[in-house]
Amino acid sequence: MKLSRIKALSIVAIGLACGHTAMAGTFSLGASALMDTSPYKGVDTRYYPVPIINYEGDDFYFRSLMAGYYLWKDDSNKLSLTAGYQPFGFKPSKSDDDQMKRLDKRRGTAMAGLAYSHNEEWGTIRTAVLGDVLDNSNGIIADATYLYTFKQDNWSLVPGVGVTWNSANQNKYYYGIDSNESRRSGLDSYKPSSGFDPYVELSARYDITQDWQAFFTGRYIRLSSEVKDSPMVNKSYTGVVWTGVTYTF
């Protein structure tokens, strides 16, 4: 599985898993297609097939590339220790830009921390704080989202709005340019600070039968000025669309 596909899958898996209620003991398999856009110069929108493997237990869950253990779980609250592979990486060889090809590779990393969600009739609050545990970026990510679920018969629709905070180390590693890279590439040196990336998302599910479901998840992210001002970036946004079918056992 290529890096950009893993990055996008990590993002949308959170929205899909939290956007729909899962019963304990639920196990599902599926097939899907994914589209993601990259903010990096010279990197095109990509399309990929993606297999799906999800499990929801009383104490443990697995959602694509994320897994967690519940510390607290009731009808309204879920608090868990969570970990997953969430690369925001960059491979110079994947860019069509000659200057970008001379930069260093940005590696993906494993992130771990706490995730919490609170459900009421007025909606769901979803939060997470994750830190790099492989010493690649040494960064921290904090995320907060509000979602509201519309349900009728065999379909559900879950729009949401949120914001992600990326620490200075996180932005520096993935969007900064040091003096050595600047000399090689001709791009200006750049050292970003922390920043907030607001986003909107939409998840939908249609129950074809009792066991078969079709789903759609999308997210549009508005990049912070700290990211947009990087010489590595030529967009003010990034986005992900994921759609497919699953079978629940």
Image (tube, grey):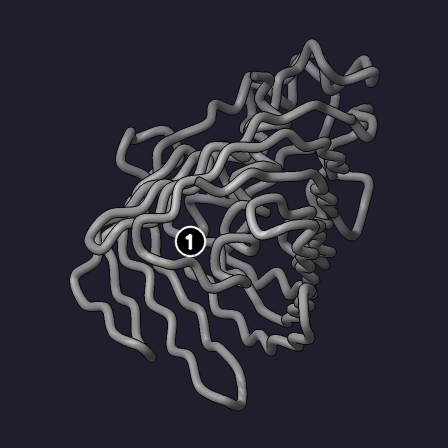
User: In the rendering, at what x and y percent does residue 108 appear?
Assistant: 46, 27
In front here: 154 or 180?
Answer: 154
In front here: 159 or 37?
Answer: 159
In the rendered image, the quadrant that contains the N terminus is top right
Tag 1, which secondary structure?
strand
In front here: 113 or 191?
Answer: 113
* Residue type (three-letter) at the residue carrying disc 1: Ile
* Residue 160: quadrant of the picture: bottom right
Which residue is at a point 53% across and 90% down the rendered structure image?
A: 122
Task: Classify 170 as above or below 87.
Answer: below
Task: Classify 34 as above or below 226.
Answer: above
User: In the rendering, at what x and y percent does residue 131 appear?
Assistant: 32, 47
User: In the rendering, at what x and y percent does residue 31 appear?
Assistant: 63, 29
In the rendered image, the quadrant that contains the C terminus is top left
Which residue is at a point 42% across and 42% down the rendered structure image?
A: 63
User: In the rendering, at what x and y percent does residue 169 appear?
Assistant: 42, 44
Q: Is residue 175 visible?
A: no
The residue sitting at the bottom extreme is: 122
Which residue is at a point 49% across and 42% down the rendered structure image?
A: 248
| Residue underneath mark 1 | 141
Label 1: few (<14), some or many (≥20) within 10 Å?
some
Q: Is residue 166 visible?
A: yes
The residue sitting at the left extreme is: 71
Task: Classify 215 as above or below 197.
Answer: above
Task: Classify 229 as above or below 224.
Answer: above
In front here: 107 or 85?
Answer: 85
The residue sitting at the front extreme is: 210
Q: How many marks?
A: 1
Query: Is 126 on the left or on the right of 99, as rendered?
Result: left
Which residue is at a point 61% across and 75% down the rendered structure image?
A: 149
